[in-house]
Image (spheres, helix red, strand yellow):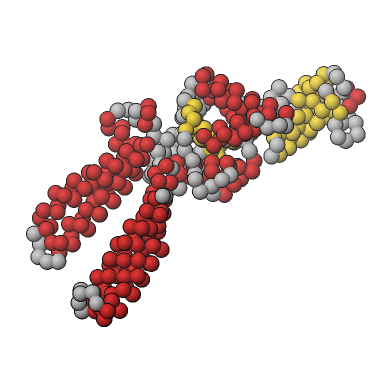
Amino acid sequence: MTAAFIFRIIGLIIFGMIGWLLGTVWAGTSDLNTASLRYILPPALLGALVGWIISPGLTTRPAAWLRRAIRELSTVQLLAGTLGLVIGLVLAALAALPLSRLPFPFGNILPTIVAVVFGYIGITALVVRQRDIFALFRRRPPAGLLDVEAAAGDEGRVHDEVLLLDTSVIIDGRIADVAKTGFIRWPMLVPRFVLAELQYIADSPDSLRRNRGRRGLEMLNGMQRESPVPVRIVDMDVAAVRQVDAKLVQLAKQLDCPIVTNDYNLNRVAGLQGVKVLNVNELSNAVKSVVLPGEAMTIRVIQEGKEIGQGIGYLDDGTMVVIENGRRFMDSEIEVVVTKVLQTNAGRMIFATPNR
């Protein structure tokens, strides 16, 4: 028997008994005879039917919702909420004694109301101020209870205590080099569903996707060993969402933390939902050397351009240089003069002409 069926049986019995009692009141007697059964039996059957129908809505469904909600909370949130509830109920118990001495009906009603209010205030206060409370006992929360939740302070404010990594930035691998430089000071989290997507890509029948997935797993393994900041696999999930990018955005909203990615579409979707995004491509473009029109540089022409007579070269940072009339200097280094710098979504392009 399933739990839902058992609760249906219990609900059928309880509501059937309630209907039976109402029927005896309607009949004016609890004695069973032909006359009284006409008044007692219909309410009892109706109550049993109602109990059979609504019992799952009162028991199993709320319990399932509660399990999903608890599963999405961090350990620190659960601990803070439990402590807050205990403290709130203790304060309510202290206030219940004097309140119970008030005249009827206040002496019967107010202790219950105060218990509910103090319990709610205790839970809210400790969950909202959990980081400050943990800081009173030690400089950082215990390693096993690392608070990956951002402090619930000002609405709309982003707290950068942790970073969420998506699949694309792990495969790209540049985040590992950025972490080694010391510019990243916060722990980097990889949700289990991102790791599952990496494994799915690594098992792909397509050789290109398979190589990308394996590279991502190798990069993640290397980051866990060599990164100066912690890189953790976390078992957080968003049960109501199926797509990985949507899960990542919802999880970032729950934790109030940024997503690190180089996926253009994820960048735009997260931005529309108010989630801060750290784009590795934007960082790469920001640290590229600044080149202004009129400057001269030496570049090696390595391939033909799309237009007639164009040559293509690259700077050390990977910036493409399009050289007008540069095709005749193929496989040689020449001095060029910058004529235009174009910023695109894919990066920076420099247009130049030969200085000879």
Residue at point 39%, 44% (across, down): 70
Q: Could you say where residue 180 lies in the image, as x and y percent from the top left?
A: 54, 21
Measured from the top left, where is residue 284 in percent x and y?
63, 30
Compared across the picture, whether 19 is left or right of 211 comes to left
Seen from the viewer's position, the closer of residues 54 and 335 is 54
Q: Quadrant of the C terminus?
A: top right
Q: Quadrant of residue 181?
A: top right
Q: Is residue 327 above or below residue 272?
A: above
Q: At 51% across and 22% down in the image, what residue appears?
A: 224
Q: Residue 32: horizontal and vertical position, in percent?
A: 23, 74
Could you tell me if residue 298 is visible in this image? yes
287 relative to 158, above or below = above
* Tally of numbered tags: 0
Quarter of the image holding residue 212? top right
Q: Residue at x 58, y 27 (%)?
A: 175
Q: Is residue 141 left or right of residue 280?
A: left
Side of 70 where 101 appears, left or right: left
Residue 280 appears in the picture as rendered:
no
Task: Name the residue located 41 percent from the left edge and 63 percent from the top edge.
Answer: 53
Is 47 drawn above or below residue 158 in the view shown?
Answer: below
Q: Position of residue 61 (x, y in %)?
A: 41, 54
Residue 204's image quarter? top right
Residue at the front extreme, as displayed: 34
Eyeballing the image, is 259 above or below 311? Answer: below
